[in-house]
Amino acid sequence: MSELAFAPLAHFADVVMGQSPGADLCNTDERGLPFLQGCAEFGARHPHSDIYCSPPLRVAKAGSVLISVRAPVGTMNYADQDYCIGRGLGAFKAKSGVSNTVFLKHAVELNAAYLHRRSQGSTFAAVSIDDVKTVPIPVFKSEKQEKIANILTGIDSAIEKTDALIAKYQQIKAGLMHDLFTRGVLPNGQLRPPREQAPELYQETAFGWIPREWQYELLDKLALRGSGHTPNKNFPEYWNGGIKWVSLADSHRLDQLYISDTEFQISHKGIQNSSAVLHPAGIVVLSRDAGVGKSAITTEPMAVSQHFMCWKCDQKIDNHFLYYWLQFNKRTFENIAMGSTILTIGLPYFKKMKIACPVDLVEQRKIAAKMKANDTRLFTLQDELSKLKQQKAGLMHDLLTGKVAVKFADATLAV
């Protein structure tokens, strides 16, 4: 196979840079073309806008690739119709008979680092029209471009379908949480009738209307509250001692029901010489600082940093129920967090925090089981999405760098 050659994007496509119109040209009466200022209006594949511009100053033609030229640089969408574009966007479309727009989109995506390097050093990340025009594109024959585009379009479709399913199950989860934590379940596992239909089944509390069989009680009376500490980092012997230690570095591991690993570990000496505590497996942890409201259940004994609260659940409250109740109230935690540098919730809040929950552990566990069943499907889809994205990244690299031959009509396509 011959050495791969490259040419700038402008050789293959017509490139246009957006220009922001004045407010007097914008309207919500559907006069002119839909207006896109930046990638905030991007969807899974196509954008959406309720703002229109008449007359449009810069137009991205239907079939173009829309590309964000301001932070985040390089995000892309396909134009499903003509759009007026503002200065946060650029657009490119393959020249007729020269190239394939879908192929070009993926070639630009593969070379995103080219644009990122050029966006550094300014007040905010941004690139110019010349930067977009000069993105290096591999030179392939038309047939090979089309075949590569078809392969990558196939995996993009799978990614979009999985994304849509994830969004569906996230909506189901939100509705399920609202119903389960306001109505609970009957012994047969069905939701109680809504209060409007059966007011006699409910009681009014400061939390709102809850089933009569429930309690609205201090969490401290139902579970053992604990916190943590950071051992002195000037003593190496306090660290890397095999005890998993939940810190803000593990924020990405939270909100996935369980946490089984941590970025850092501490030692028994670290615990003995600090206020850190080795908590048993099964505690529910909640971030009260950066990433406020994120939570998880530990799968083995762990310590936590001072940025976390944790609860040991026993005979009065189920740890899975508590986890999902914290998830249900995540927005509350986010709203009450205060601080100029790092948002945080002070310890006094948790001393007074009350929870609405069934007195009966059986009902608690039924509620948690319904939530967990939905999460199991959701997490499976998220894993599938991650694998698809990894597969796409590998395919893009191999196909667009000539690492693998592409078969078309039973013949190998040469560069």
Image (cartoon, grey):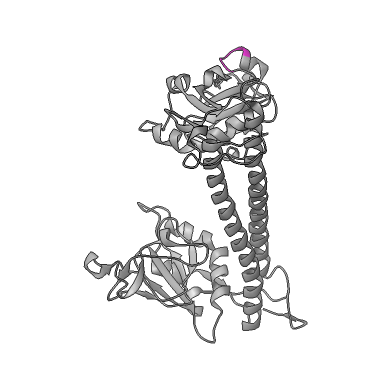
Residue at coordinates 59% horizontally, 41% vertically from top-left? 191
Q: Say whether residue 210 is visible.
A: yes
What residue range appears in magenta?
Answer: 272-276
Q: Hey, which residue is sitting farthest right in the picture?
A: 410
- On-image quarter of the C terminus: bottom right
From what the image shows, is residue 227 above or below residue 253?
above
From what the image shows, is residue 177 above or below residue 313?
below
Residue 285 picture location, percent across and down? 58, 28
* 139 displayed left or right of 288: right
Q: Hey, which residue is sitting farthest bottom in the picture?
A: 97
Please name the predominant secondary structure of the magenta segment in the image.
loop
Q: Is residue 273 rendered magenta in the image?
A: yes
Task: Locate residue 73: give its quadrant.
Answer: bottom left
Task: Locate residue 214: give its quadrant.
Answer: top right
Residue 253 picture location, percent across and down? 60, 38
Residue at coordinates 51% horizontally, 37% vertically from top-left? 182
- On-image quarter of the N terminus: bottom right
